[in-house]
Image (spheres, helix red, strand yellow):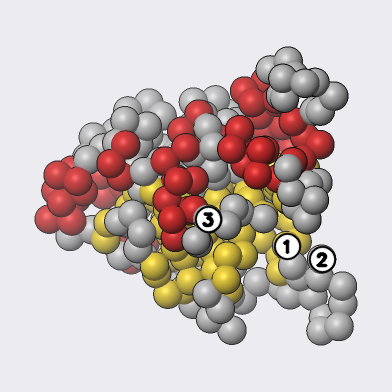
Amino acid sequence: MAWTLRLQGVGNAFAVELGSAMATLERDGIPWLTIDCGGEGLSHYLEQYDGAYPSALFLTHAHLDHVSGFERLFVSAWFSEARRGRVKLYVPAPLLPLLHQRIGEYPNVLAEGGVNLWDAFQVIPVGEAFWHQGVRLEVFPVRHHWPQSAFGLRLKGSLVWTGDTRPIPEMLARYADDNELVAHDCALHGNPSHSGVDDLEREYPPALLQRCLLYHYASTAEGEQLAARGHRVAHPGEVIILAEPTALQAHAGQNLG
């Protein structure tokens, strides 16, 4: 079983040419679970997968550069009998009210009325862990704007995706202890909501930094500067081979959804 990570976008909210930060875990080359759904990121997803929309997503937080593709995602699901109500949204439970305020409150998602935004999806609130197609994934809070408003994702033994965050050494000591690739928020300069490269170099040991893949930077030129400092930098459209997960998996023959 081959696992890969395909990057739809790697930039911050202003780096339109890099795409909004978004990625998809693939299993044997087939989209398995998509992380976030920004506008530019969704456009890149459609290009990469020949116009097919995501069928399962995990949401890290509710900032618009990570959820602004939801109107198109809704339309794609609602007007498809095969997809209506079947697009899985794994949402950390504390994030649900924020997500609804951000994208679910608009009156009459269709001009004709009679439809709720969430009718198109299967919304699955999640806590510290959840199962997707028989594989257990872990969820952990990160440091972005406000407590319990942003979350990271771990596929044990394979990938840790931090989402937008300041440095989180205590979380990565627990959730990145199995030699995972760590996709980490990092720009040339940090701020109260995002990591800068100086922050990571100060707070993370060299062995962890060697496993980090930096995304959410501001421009191509900035990415080149991060690389010049010896860091691995993510690029839009890049496909990364992942290690086989050590995460718990359901027994063969069990209904995997």
How far across and down, in percent of the image, does residue 246 sit?
A: 61, 76
Residue at the spot x=26%, y=49% of the render? 201
On residue 62, the disc is none
First-in-chain label (2 vs 3): 3
First-in-chain label (2 vs 1): 1
How far across and down, in percent of the image, does residue 137 sit?
A: 66, 61
How far across and down, in percent of the image, does residue 190 sit?
A: 29, 33
Image quadrant where residue 253 sits: bottom right
Mark 2 or 3: the one toward you? 3
Badge 1 density bin: few <14, some 14–19, many ≥20, Cα 10 Å: some
SS for callout 1: strand
Q: Is residue 196 above or below residue 128?
A: above
Cβ–Cβ under 8 Å for marks 2 and 3: no
User: Front-most of 247 and 201?
Assistant: 247
Q: Where does label 1 land, which residue?
A: 132
Cβ–Cβ under 8 Å for marks 2 and 1: yes
Amino acid at pointer 3: Gly
SS for callout 2: loop
